[in-house]
Image: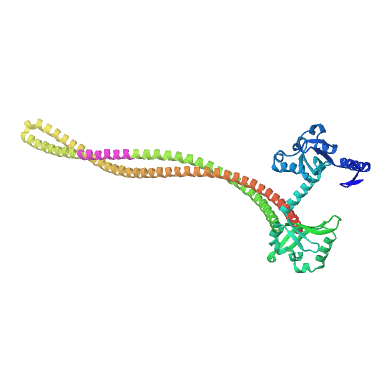
Amino acid sequence: MAAVAGFEVDAGGHLAEAEVLDLQGKIEALNRVQAVIEFNLDGTVLTANDNFLRALGYRLEEIQGRHHRMFVDPAYAASEEYRRFWQDLNRGQFQAAEYRRIGKGGKEVWIQASYNPVFDREHRVVKVVKFATDITESKLRNAEFEGQIAAIRTSMAVIEFQLDGTVLTANDNFLRALGYGLEEIRGRHHRMFVEPAFAASEDYRRFWSALNKGEYQAGEFKRIGRGGREVWIQASYNPIMDASGRPYKVVKFAIDTTEVREIMNAVARNARTLAGSAVELTRVSQEMGQTARDTSNKAGVVAAASEQVSRNVTTVATGSEEMSASIREISKSAVEAARVATDAVRVAEATDATVGKLGESSAQIGKVIKVITSIAQQTNLLALNATIEAARAGEAGRGFAVVANEVKELAKQTARATEEIGQKIEAIQVDTRQSVDAIRQISQIIAQINNLQTAIAGAVEEQTATTNEMSRNVAEAAKGSDEIASNIQRVGDAVRVTADGATRTLQSAEEQAKLAAELQRLTARFTT
């Protein structure tokens, strides 16, 4: 017997039966637990076991005789890298790695595989056998874990420590939050980030002791950055275990809450201010409500008074309208009286002129009477002379004497009549002068009456205008009183609405006070 590649062979170069059985057992074991597929050297599929077919989703007849490239991405199948992959296998070079393959329907499959060239007795490569394990689930799970870790490292501050607290590394988020460069903190102890008093305390010693025991630590921590700057972080210190379950390092994931804490402090201050404002608002609301009620009561009184004023103004307006009508009637009468007085003045003036003419006529009559008197005197004188001459004539002049006597007698009668007429004319002249004087006085009085009537008419006209204006003003006052009453009513309604609003404001203020108290309670959790 001789040994070839670790197996015993007989003189003909064949494996011993025991070795064959052993080899068959191993192959069967591999077939039970692994996906196995065999290829020609050109990549054509020879056969595949059930594990492989299940993993890729095919039946054997769907892949047998087809090229390996059916399991890879078309771009990779056309690449120089893929060509070299098969060249190396043809040279007998073993290939092993994690591979991404494409199953039926384009399903993505990840495998941990080895491509194994199989040699003949002359050590020539005759085929390739691939042993593979489907790691798709673990690959996807690891990818998810890696994605989560990458996301955490992207969004959070991360720093790693040895179990004694020495800094191993830190990401950019942590370095920015504390204001350091990596080389400034690597190899230094965690105590550089805490206040000296806390670093020397028993609490700090217990903190690291718990981490060394694998106990998780989380909370909000005050840390000291570059230049003594105060930094607040929400962090978890996570012991990382080795394969045996023992911690070998600590990873801290942190969020810089400095700004949030400052905001919460500001919110807390505002909450206190809000609480004070709520108290003040409550007081003001109570006062406003009381004021609104008082105003509503006063508005009711004013409304009643306004209604009484409106009624009084309406009465005045009615009286004013009646007075206006009376004054219009007086105005008409005054105008008519002025017209009559004017006519009387004209008549008096005409009468005065007529009486004046009568006086002139009386004077002329007086002159005529004087002439008649003079003629009567001359006639009497002539009659006397005729009598004397008749007496001288004797009997012959007797007839003439009779005529002369009659003429004389007639002259006497004429003289007496003329004297009576003269007396009457004088009386008429006296009466005429008195009439003229009286008419002149009447004319003057009528003129005065006319002036007074004109003045009265003007005054009445002015009074009419004044009364009309007063009536208009009273009407407007009545309208204004109605509007005042209406406005007072609206004021009353508005005040009642204000009172209701004050009540609701008071309720809101009480709710605001409760919210402020709750806000103070909540912010106290972040600021203490």
Query: Is residue 348 located in the magenta-colored stretch of the structure?
Result: yes
**161 and 242: which is toward the camera:** 242
Q: In which quadrant is the C terminus drawn? A: bottom right
Pick the front one: 325 or 140? 140
Q: Which residues are magenta?
A: 345-364
- Residue 325, given in percent of the width and then of the height, sits at 48, 39
Q: Measuring 79% from the left and 34% from the top, which residue is drawn there? A: 63
Above or below, comparing residue 112 to residue 526 in the picture: above
Q: How far from the left and from the top, in percent, is residue 113? A: 80, 44
Query: Is 350 left or right of 263, judged from the image as shown?
Result: left
Residue 10, by quadrant, is top right
Q: Nearer the viewer, residue 35 or 173?
A: 35
Task: Determine the residue located farthest toward the front in the rendered image.
Answer: 11
Based on the displayed image, in which of its 4 quarters is residue 438 positioned? top left
Question: Can residue 371 be seen from the camera position used here?
Answer: yes
| Quadrant where the image shows the N terminus | top right
Q: Total number of numbered labels?
A: 0
Give the x, y percent position of residue 267. 70, 57
The prevailing secondary structure element of the residues shown in magenta is: helix
Is residue 227 one of those drawn in magenta? no
**Coloration mode:** rainbow
> Which residue, as the protein is rendered here, is positioned at the far right?
18
- Residue at position x 35%, y 42% in the image: 446
Out of 250 and 116, give the one closest to the viewer: 116
Q: Position of residue 266 (x, y in %)?
A: 69, 59
In the image, residue 508 sits, relative to residue 221, either above or below, namely: above
| Residue 176 as seen in the image, left or right of residue 165 | left
Q: Residue at x 15, y 33 (%)?
A: 406
Query: Looking at the image, can residue 261 be seen?
Result: no
